[in-house]
Amino acid sequence: MNQEKRLYNITTFGCQMNKADSERMAGILENMGFEFTEDPNQAKVLVYNTCTIRDNAEQKVYSYLGRQAKRKHQEPDLTLVVAGCVAQQEGEQLLRRVPELDLVMGPQHANRLDSLLEQVFAGNQIVATEPIHIYEDITKPRRESEVSAWVNIIYGCNERCSYCVVPNVRGVEQSRTPEAIKAEIEELAKQGYKEITLLGQNIDAYGRDLPGVTETGRHKHTLTDLLYYIHDIEGIERIRFATSHPRYFTERLIKACYELPKVCEHFHIPFQSGDNEILKAMKRGYTHERYRDIIAKIREYMPDAAISADAIVGFPGETEEQFQNTLKLVEDIGFDQLNTAAYSPRPNTPAAEWENQIDEQEKSDRLQRLNHLVAIKAGERSLRYQDRIEEVLVEDINPKDTTQVMGRTRGNRLTFFAGNLAELKGKVVSVKITEVRAFSLTGNALSLATV
C-alpha cells in the first residue's frame, strides 16, 4: 500500500461503549502507520462502528456503505470494515448484502483489528463474530478528548431484557481485573487526563465473574470496591461511571459515592418504563417503586445529585394508562436529563415477535409528549443553578462562540463562560452561573485562578 495514502477514517454510531471501542481501533490503526482524516472519501481504510439498538441507526449504516461500495469499484485498494453490533448481528449476511466489504467484526474483536487487517491485506475477506475471551487491552486508544477519558471495566451483558439486542451482539459479561483497570487509569493520569468515566453495558455487574468472595459471602470485586481501589490515583480529579441497572444498584454503592470526594454526584440509571406490567414484560427485574426508592436514597445522601436515565415509549402492549405511569414517574422524580426512544423491534429479541405492537403514529405521539415533559422538568431542575458557584472542568472551546470555553459541572451540566482555552484546558474553574437553560448553563469565571 502506497505510503502517502495510508489514511483512515472511523464513523461511530451509538453508545459510549462504541465510542470507547472506536478510540481503541484508532489507536491500533495509528500504531500500524495510518493517519486519521476527517474526510471518509480520502481514507483508504474506512471503519463503520455500528449500533443495532434502533432500526434507524442500522439503516443509516447501509446508506453510508452503499456510497462507499460504489467508490470501491473505482478504487480497489479501499478497505471497507464494518465493526460493532450490526456486524455481530448480521455476520456473513452483511457480505451477501454488501459483497464489497473486506472485514466484518463484532465488538469483542476490536482489540484484534491489526491482525484481522493483516489477513485482509493478504487478500482475504474476513468475518470475525465468534465469541472470544477479550484479552487484556494493551492498545493505546487515540482518544477524542485530552481531558476526559473512557475506561472499559466490563464487557458484555448477562441480562435478557425482552427488547434488547445487546447480549446477543456484545456477548457474556467479562470483567477486567482491578489491577489492569488501575494501571490504565494511572497511565491516563500521567498523560494529563483529569476525568475518567468507567464504562460497562451493565456496570453494577462488575466483578461477578471474577474469582473471590468475602467472609460475609459477597463478591470480593464489585463496582463499589473498585471505586475505593482507584480513588486515590494522583492526577485524576473526577470519576464517573455508566450505565447502571436498578436491579443491582445498592446503598453500599451510594454510600461510596457520597464518601469518595472524586466521584461525581451524577447517576445514569435507566428506568425504561414507569409501569410495573410493562417492566415485567420487558424482563427488567424491578418495579417502579424500587426505582423510586433508589432515587430517594441517592437524594438522601446527596440532595443535589444529578439524575439521568433512559426511557422507552410504545413498548408492545403499552396502553395509554401505562404510558401515563411513565409520565408520572418523570413528573415525580424530575430528571436532569432523559434519553428517550420509541420502541423499535430488533432482530432475535422476544418482543419483536409479539403481535401487540403499537402503531408508529401512536409511538411518535407518546414520544413527543414525553419529550415535552422532559424539557419542562429539566428546565425546572436547572433553576437550582442560578447564581450558584459551580466547579467546571474545562474541556474545549464553545463551537458557537469562540470567545467562550466549555466544560462540565460535577453534575454533568454543560457550562459555557468567557476564557482562553490554551490557558484553561484541563483546569477546574469556579464559575458563577448567570444563565440557566434546560440542558446547559452560562456563567462568569470568578477568577481565572483555578481551583
Image (tube, rainbow, N blue to C red):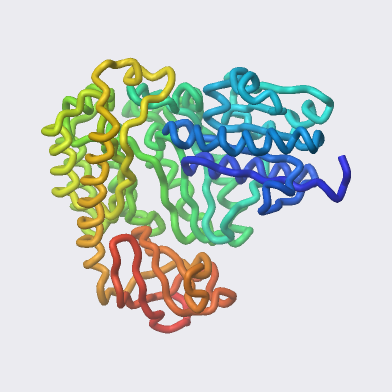
- Examine the rendering and report whether any part of residue 329 can be seen: yes
Residue drawn 63% across the image and 29% down it: 109
User: From the image, which quarter does the N terminus lie in?
Assistant: top right
Using the rendered view, name the quadrant where residue 117 is placed.
Answer: top right
Residue drawn 56% across the image and 43% down it: 12
Residue drawn 47% across the image and 61% down it: 237
In the displayed structure, 103 sits above or below 267; it is above
Query: Looking at the image, which residue sits at the far bottom?
Result: 447
**Image label count:** 0
Residue 146 percent coordinates (x, y): 58, 60
In the displayed structure, 150 sits above or below 124; it is below
For this rendering, which residue is in front, 12 or 75?
A: 75
For this rendering, which residue is in front, 252 or 431?
A: 431
Query: Looking at the image, which residue sits at the far right?
Result: 2
Image position of 160 (left or right of 191): left
Residue 188 percent coordinates (x, y): 59, 54
Image position of 425 (left or right of 412): right
Residue 276 percent coordinates (x, y): 16, 29
Residue drawn 47% across the image and 45% down it: 198
- Examine the rendering and report whether any part of residue 129 can be seen: no
Residue 36 percent coordinates (x, y): 71, 51
In the displayed structure, 154 sits above or below 94; it is below
For this rendering, which residue is in front, 168 or 7?
A: 7
